[in-house]
Image (tube, rainbow, N blue to C red):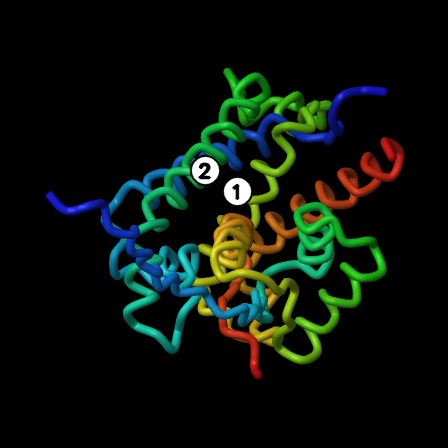
Amino acid sequence: MTDGIIIQLAPLEAVHLRNLIDEFLALLTTDGEHDEAITRLTPNPYPDDAAAAREYRDGTRDDLLQRRGRDAARMNAALGSLSADVDPSSAAAVTAQPLRIPVADVDSWMRTLAAMRLVVANRLAIDSDDDHDPSDPRFHVYDWLGYRLDELIRLADEYDAMAS
Amino acid sequence: MSAASPTELVEEQLTVAPLVPWELVVWDDPVNLMSYVARIFRTYFGYGPERANALMLAVHNDGHAVVATGPRETMEVHAQAMHDYGLWATVRKAPQ
């Protein structure tokens, strides 16, 4: 049995994913103190206890953001082979190719896709299940990330079922 | 010099932490996929598919669900893991 799961990804898609990841990494390293997306990525587990909230935040926030950065960098590196030297006008750029994601990397991919989706949702002000306008092109990125994440979950679930 | 007096036993007042359990609560949000939440409950907590799915549906339908109970420190570790995955998790004392 192969170690890991195999997704089909066009090089141009890999390029787009890497661009998003680069933006995400930049967001993580800026002072996101007052950025609502960063706030959403570092939830307060003690909404009714300011002192406990502060203590938790001081003890965990930086580590959490660093782990997010490591997850994203790992995914970025894995996409490198596909996204190098892509000529966007070529047929090869939009032809899907297999990409193997080792088992050890699957969670990093899922966490990064989910986190980038949360950031996009924040920018789109998605606050309820009904806040979705498929005709708004900005939702395309959101839907595309969701499609990729859902596919990854399905493949990972199948892999687990086979491995057990 | 006087003879050694009997050793005075100082009783240390050990403050025993009350065994009040804490809860890890996961809250619904409009972004995270249902398949994703169920998978995390299954893979991180080791819950069976049925329990993981039932908890995911409870989060979705009721707005939140208690997904783990235990010592506060453990619940905080779980909360960090949930936050890593992008889930919105809080920690609270279990209702008496």
Secondary element at tag 1: helix
Residue A21 badge: 2
Residue A112 badge: 1
Subunit of mark 1?
A
Identity of the residue drawn at 32% across and 40% down: A26
Image location (x, y in percent) of residue B77:
50, 51
Which residue is situated farthest in the left direction here?
B1
All told, the count of numbered labels is 2
CB under 8 Å between callouts 2 and 1? Answer: yes
The front one of B15 and B56 is B15
Q: Does residue A44 appear to the left or right of B92 in the view shown?
A: left
Image location (x, y in percent) of residue A86:
53, 20
Subunit of mark 2?
A
Identity of the residue drawn at 24% across and 51% down: B5
Q: Residues within 10 Å of mark 2 (few under 14, many from 20)?
A: many
Q: Does residue B35 appear to the left or right of A52 in the view shown?
A: right
Quarter of the image with the C terminus of chain A is top right
Residue A24 badge: none
The front one of A44 and B30 is A44
**Residue type of the residue flagged with mark 2:** Ile
Q: Does residue A133 appear to the left or right of A157 in the view shown?
A: left
- Lower position in the chain sequence, tag 2 or tag 1: 2
* Disc number lying in front (2 or 1): 1
Q: Quadrant of residue A102?
A: top right
Image location (x, y in percent) of residue A2:
80, 20
